[in-house]
Image (tube, rainbow, N blue to C red):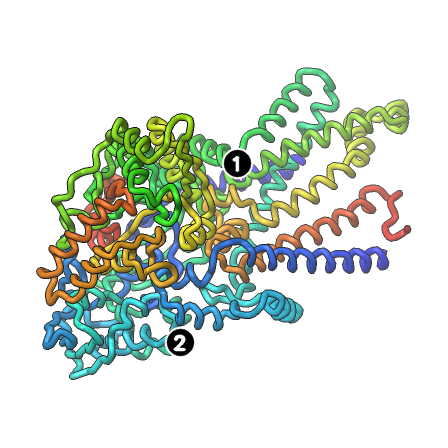
Amino acid sequence: MASFLIARLASALVVIFGVVCTVFLLIHLVPGDPVELMLGESAQPADRAALREALGLDRPLPVQLGVYLERLAHLDLGQSLHSQRPVAEVLAARLPATAELAVAALLVAIVTALPLGVLAATHHNGAWDTGAMGFSLLGVSIPNFWMGPLLILVFSIGLGWTPVSGRSGLASLILPALTLGTALAAILARMVRSSLLEVLNEDYIRTARAKGLSPAAVMWRHALRNAWLPVITVLGLQLGALLGGAVVTETVFSWPGVGSLMIEAIQKRDYPVVQGCVLVIAVAYVVVNTLTDLVYGWIDPRIRLGDA
Amino acid sequence: MSRLLAFFILVFVAGCGGHVTPPDRVRLGIASPATTLDPRFATDATSSRVVRLLYRRLVDFDPAGRPVPALAKWEAITPTHYRLRLGREGRVFSDGSRLTAADVKATYASVLDPATASPHRTTLTLIERIRVIDDDTLDFFIDRPDPLFPAYLVLGIVPAHALAGKDALNEQPMGSGPFELEEWRDDGAMLLRARSDGRRVELVPVKDPTVRTLKLLRGEIDLLQNDLPPELYHYLDARGTMRLHRRRGSNFTYLGFNMQDPATSDLRVRQAVAHAIDRTRIIRYVLHGGARRAEALLPPEHWAGNPDLKPIQYDPALARRLLHAAGYSARHPLHLVYKTSTDPFRVRLATIIQHQLKEVGIDTEVRSYDWGTFYGDIKAGRFQMYSLSWVGIRTPDVFRYVFHSTSLPPEGANRGRYASAEVDRLIGQAESAPSLAAQAPLYRRIQQQLHEDLPYVPLWYEDQVVVARASIRGYRLAADGNYDGLIDVRRGRAHQ
């Protein structure tokens, strides 16, 4: 286990380093000048040059990258070019909202996908299966920018149950979580179904049934536990994406998370903030995927991590 | 599983029950949050408008764009020496200290200091020296005569003692304006408190226009001003439960040409494009009547505007003849690239113009880019045709900035590389005229010349629009879309 963790940590550092360097170079290659956007078109060349120097943007790109990496090694993400606030502070203000939305969306997805997937698998080719998979297809097909306003129209305007947008308590979390969770639920439901269909034909399930176990016990104790592995893989990848910020959902619901922060920063060419956001996303992916690998061992004791 | 479901139901029920409106608060929905509250750095629309509420400025403008006294009256002692006398109103900062001539000097000196890196410095570099006479009087000395000088004195005045660090002033603004900042949340929402009676106004950023509209319907915000697609105004107006007010605006939308491009440098091509666009139909059906046709950058009611310009008529037959004369035909069609931003409404307009140009035989390719890329391309001259708007133009010195042959980016905003000896001469002549009255006819001639040369096809001036819930009273819509109407806004008894 220890060797596994060390190996994962090392590969994670390499991945994060690669992502940071690539994004640093790419964002500087994108047309658009932060100094221009800050000072406006009418600024004098001397003023532009002075600000460029003050922000360190006049140095060669490799030097800028070196300075950035050196600061990063000291856990200093730099300062926002526009607000002059430390990037870590800006991110810290946005991360709770993103984490809250990601966890809520994940809960919505699991709570919806699990029964749907089980229903579909246990009523294979029946009406339940068709209905569940129809819902799943719908969930995957409806884009969030349409689903969001639709939910608002029904639950906020029509029924008056929830706020339209913003982050103002638990009620405001419901619609963004439903919007984000529905698409994920659709993917998960399909995964649960196909995985269960495979497992339900295994010999040990037949044996469990022959032993006289109730259908529920067979399903929960034997089938689902073994069907979880592929589902968890997808879940891990999706959670990484959710923690990286759900840009469209955050925009529709004015949810002040990392996704909307990154979009604003890209538009303003606020390089350090973009870098900070990308770093958070990369770390989220790596951490969640490492945790996913660890969970494999817990779900299926036959898997021994680190035994090459 | 059942516990999890119960938890969700509990959360849902606990969270429901509608949104309670605090009775002392009027909420304005805005498209984007302010980026700074320091008047030395505010340039984006929201920041500039909020800064007007927090700080007072020396000079403001009348409806015709003439500078009028705000904090101070001025007197031109010589063409390069202006004396300003501060009035009695608006002289107390939010920390209780008194606004004096020393604060005015400190504010302008700070902006003029290159180390401050203020985006407003360029406009003010003609200031040579500022001399404080007493607490209420100060002199500005400029390096050349400029009758427009008072119109440049529109910076919000900050206390001299608060100028030590720009971060502090940005987060804790200290002005003498009608409001003070009570809270600025991480999501960009801002709570302002009226200094006169403690009323609160909240600015709520909601990026998506549809969601902004729905929030208004639901009563989560009380007012919306501009930044909505025209069909949403129409939708709100048709419901009958909202009050919609319009007033003539001066924000100018245009189509710009690259004058160094082989195709668009030909006047006949630019004229053909101008005559091929049916502005009347676009205004009626796409903008739902929320604009008026423009013939020049300054509207005709501006003191330097030209009301005598002959409107460019929609005449597709003439457009075809002009194209034919320029050497284009069905076998050899004109192909143009039209660049615009990714704003859905701007893309829709570009598509409509593309269709209208197609009717006269111009094959147009629309390319939309994110703002940074689009703006970079336009500045670098990497375009044939683009559309943009000039927002908040007050003074005719904009003609030097936009059309003088020496104002190519980065020195100015002559993005189309327009060069006219006649326009250069008239700009110089206008700038050396001794008064606004003497400048006005010269600026009118400049607009006449531009109307003939067509470096821009003038399209329209968009209206200012506000939609408010029926309970909202006293909001006055400004011609430039500022938020000054919040000073007198009240919630009436009709609120649900």
Q: Check disc 2 and report its element: helix, strand or loop.
A: helix
What is the chain identity of the residue bearing mark 2? B
Query: In the displayed structure, would residue B191 be above or below residue A137?
Result: below
Answer with the quarter of the image where residue B69 lies.
bottom left
Please give left or right for residue A177 compared with residue B92 in the image. right
Give amino acid for label 1: Asn
Question: Are there few (<14), some (14-19), or many (20+) residues within 10 Å of tag 2?
Answer: few
Of B357 and B78, nearer the camera is: B357
Give amino acid for label 2: Ala
Residue A99, position in %: x, y?
A: 59, 51
Residue B6, position in %: x, y?
A: 60, 37
Marks 2 and 1 share the same chain: no
Which numbered marker is on residue B115?
2
> What residue is shown at x 10% (from left), y 65% (from top)?
B435
Kindly give the residue lying farthest to the top in the view shown.
A126
Residue B134, position in %: x, y?
A: 16, 83
Of B407 and B184, nearer the camera is: B407
Task: Name the front one of labels 2 and 1.
Answer: 2
Query: In the displayed structure, would residue A187 be above or below residue B102?
Result: above
> What residue is shown at x 48% (from left), y 64% (from top)?
A81
Identify residue for label 1.
A144
Answer with the quarter of the image where residue B145 lies.
bottom left
> What residue is shown at x 72% (from left), y 19% (from top)?
A123
